[in-house]
Structure formats: C-alpha cells, structure tokens
Amino acid sequence: MENRHTKEDLVIMQALPLDLKVRLTEDRIRAWVDKYGEDGVCVSFSGGKDSTVLLHIVRNLYPDIRAVFSNTGLEYPEIRQFAMSHDKVDIVYPDVRFKDVITEYGYPLIGKEVAEAIYYARRIGGGAHTQAKRQDFCHNLQAWRTHTLSRQAAPRTDGQFLQGNIHRQRGGVYGTTTTEDVLPQTQTIQRTGSVSGTTEKAVRSPRQVADNWHNYRKGERRRHELKGFKAGVATQTENIPNRPSQFNKEKYLPLARDLPVKISHFCCNKLKKAPMKKYQKEQGVVPIIGTMAEESRVRMQGWIRTGCNAWDSKNPKSQPLSFWTNQDVLQYIVEHDLPICSVYGEIVSVDENGIEYPPNILTGFGKLKCTGCDRTGCIYCAFGFHNEKGETRFQRLARTHPKLYEFAMGGGGWTDNPNYDPTAPEYDGEWKNWNFKKIWTPNEKGLGMKKVFDMCNEIMGKDFYRYE
C-alpha cells in the first residue's frame, strides 16, 4: 500500500491555525462515524488532556457516542477519578497485574522500539528475527566479541583507535587496548566482480571504519550488501553511505548484554491494548484515538502511511488529532475553558525569559505549558525517562505521591532466570548470549526499580536515570 502522505505534508498541516485544525478534525470524525455509525465507534479515553480534548470535540458532534477507559491500575489516582467522573464511559480491566507482566516479560526501559529489540535479540537459539534485532545494536559484532564491553576501545575521529591509554565514555572506563584488539587499520571487503567474473577489493580507510562504527545506517547497508552479494554483480567501490540511522540502537548494547534484568515492550500490550481490543471485538466498535504524530517516530510513520483514518488497516482506527501539536491541545483547553485532570496543574504562558503568566486570548498565548505533569500515562513506565530534563517523572512522583514512589523503588530481589540455559555457549556466532543464572525481578514488597536504575547508571553512566 502506497503512503497517503509525506513528512512534508505533516509539517504543513502542523503549521495550520488551530481553528482550521479543529474543522479538519471534525471532518475526519464525521467520515468515520458515517462509515461505522454512532453505535459502531467509541472514543478511547485515558483521562489525559489529549483524549479529553478529543472527547470534547467528538461529543460536540455526537453527544451520545460512548467512551472507554482502560483501568490498568497504573494511572495517577487523579486521572482515574477524572476519567470515571464522565458520563457514558465504559471501563475495562486487564487480566494480569503489572508486576506479573514485568516478571514474565521484562521492565519497560529506554523506549518501546529499543525494548522490543532487546527482548528478541536476547533469545538464545533464535532465528532470523533474533539475528535481525541483534544487528540493530552493533553491525560489527566481532569487535565486541574480541574485547569485552567493560574494556572496549572506541575509534577516534582521526580514524585511529585509542591505544595505551584510558578512555572514558558516559561515565564508563575502558581499558588499555591496541588497534589489533578491535579492528585492523584498514578493512578489506571482497566483492563479486563484474560480468566478466573478476573480483575487486573495496578498501575502507581507518576514518571510514571509525565512521561506520558510530554511524551505521542499517537500511542502506543491508540493501547495498544484498544487492551486491546476492545478485552476483559488482557494486560501487566507494564507501557505503554513513548517515545516522533511526534504527541504530548501538549505544544501548551494554544494557542488552550486561544488565541482569529482563527488558521488554509488552506491558502496554498486555495491560492496556489487550482489554481494549477485547472490548472492541465484543461490542463491535472501532476506536477513535487521541494520539498525535509528533509524539513518536512510529506514530509519525503511521500517519504518513494511512492518514488520520486507517480504513484499510487490519485493526481500523481513527486518529483525528494526528496533525495537532501539544501546543494546539493546550490552546484548545484554554480557549474552551475545558476542565482537565488536576495532575496537570495550571496552564500558563511562558515568555522568552522563562517567566510564567496567565494566558490571555487577546494578547496571544506565547508558549504554553502545564505547571504540573506535562504528560501522564502509566506512572511506573520508564520509556523515555532517560531523556527528561529538569524534574523527571519519578522525582515528581516522589514529591506528589510518595507512597506510590516507595512501591516503585522498593522491593525486588534476585531470582533464578527461567530462561537460563546451562548448555548454551557463551557466544552465538559473534553475539554474546544473555544467559544470567540470577536476574532481578519485582516481588510483593515492590517493583524494585531503584536497583534497576542503579544498575543502568553503573553501565550507562551517572545520572543516566535520575530518580532521587
């Protein structure tokens, strides 16, 4: 299926004035309801500010459309109370607890894409899918097998590898190494020749090898190599393009291999999506969802592929706010004096000097922000947590909800790894198997996230996770 939009389309639509965006959103909602009927759709309502705006727009058009709230038990108590205070809101519950999900599958660390890649890359004896996920973390696994992660040499920008000294990176200490410990000064690649069957060598300079180490572009490299090696024809002898890859997860390889903690992306699927899908199937409804393309690359790519209304998707859904921004949501709330959950605090304007003041429709809003939580969701989720500036979500949780914070940080313990395989080799090819005998898991006393964050900080550097 061809893409319905481009990234440039999204940029143009995001720049539209809010009143026009509202009309476009209403058009998409009407089209969705025209196809499925008022009884055939539901609003996915989380109690957050985005879905609150969506529900307000939908019910201005269709007052009787039902909403559904997934009560995972992981929301802020205020969010749960706010969502359940609305009329015509059905409530669904997961079949499992968060503690049980992370015990079986793993903690939600880094981000969904990275967590998914780690989960599958760690599987011992996995097939092609596992091998593909491992390539996401390091395109030159031989280097990591030759020298252990705790004493790894890294190439300098001048193309030479660090020799005979100590190199510090992200708080970690790497030991004395030589060039031969990691990669040769030049890397020669034998390629199939031209039509005559001759062969030629493409020699990469030390600078090119160093660039490849840090800027591996997975998609282009794989297409380039497959074209040359599988087709049996000559390919270009110049260096394969080296641009930063959106797929490259190389910097998280130490966590994938050295952290004795399960990591996965399953918590949202098991706790939120599964009960929602069950409800939609039983009720015969398709959802209207308040997500926006600016929130993640995955959501942006989804909008480019299907647009707001995914008519032909395996699981049809409407996302009529896709081209909105967070500023649009805040402006809509202010203009309509729309009540939102108390965890967000007040909405204020911020000038270029960082001074906050009440937003004024007559003088313009400037940049809007919430004085409380900027985003809500599962309170124990650590996806994106390492990127937060200022007060982080767990530091805020300690201040606003100390008992929930204590449960998140406390507890936990070492348990037998159910996936430990005593017969597995240390390495699978050039990949070091994740095969700890003991792993850290939550228990009835708490989720044990303090220990998890501390171990991550030991591997990735001080303050990678700021939670205290």
Image (spheres, grey):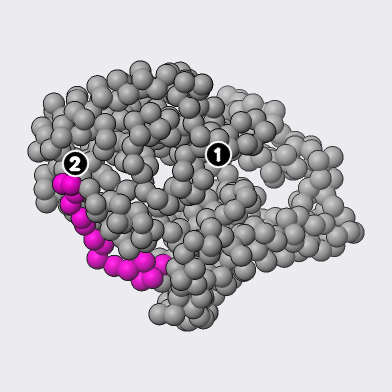
Q: Amino acid type of disc 2?
A: Cys
CA neighbours of label 2 inside 10 A, class few (<14), some (14 to 19), many (20+): many
Give me the C-alpha separation between circle 1 and circle 2. Answer: 34 Å
Observer able to see residue 1: no
Q: Amino acid type of disc 1?
A: Gln
Observer able to see residue 287: yes
Left or right? Give the position of 439 relative to 333: right
Q: Is residue 239 above or below residue 185?
A: above
The secondary element bearing badge 2 is classed as strand
Q: Residue at x 22, y 48 (%)?
A: 86
**Is tag 1's residue or tag 2's residue first in the polypeptide sequence?**
2
Q: Which residue is drawn at 44% across and 80% down?
A: 445
Disc nearest the viewer among 1 and 2 = 2
Location of the C terminus (image quadrant): bottom right
Q: Position of residue 29 (x, y in %)?
A: 23, 28
Front in this rendered view, residue 425 or 116: 116
The secondary element bearing badge 1 is classed as loop
Q: In this view, does 243 lie above or below 449?
A: above
In reply to whether residue 43 is colored magenta, the answer given is: no
Location of the N terminus (image quadrant): top left
Q: In this view, does 86 lie above or below 76?
A: above
**Which residue is disc 1 drawn over?**
246
Q: Do the residues labelled 1 and 2 touch (CB within 8 Å)?
A: no
**Which residue is disc 2 drawn over?**
42
Residue segment shown in magenta:
87-102
Q: Where is residue 288 in the image (x, y as percent from the top left)?
A: 25, 37
Numbered badge on residue 9:
none
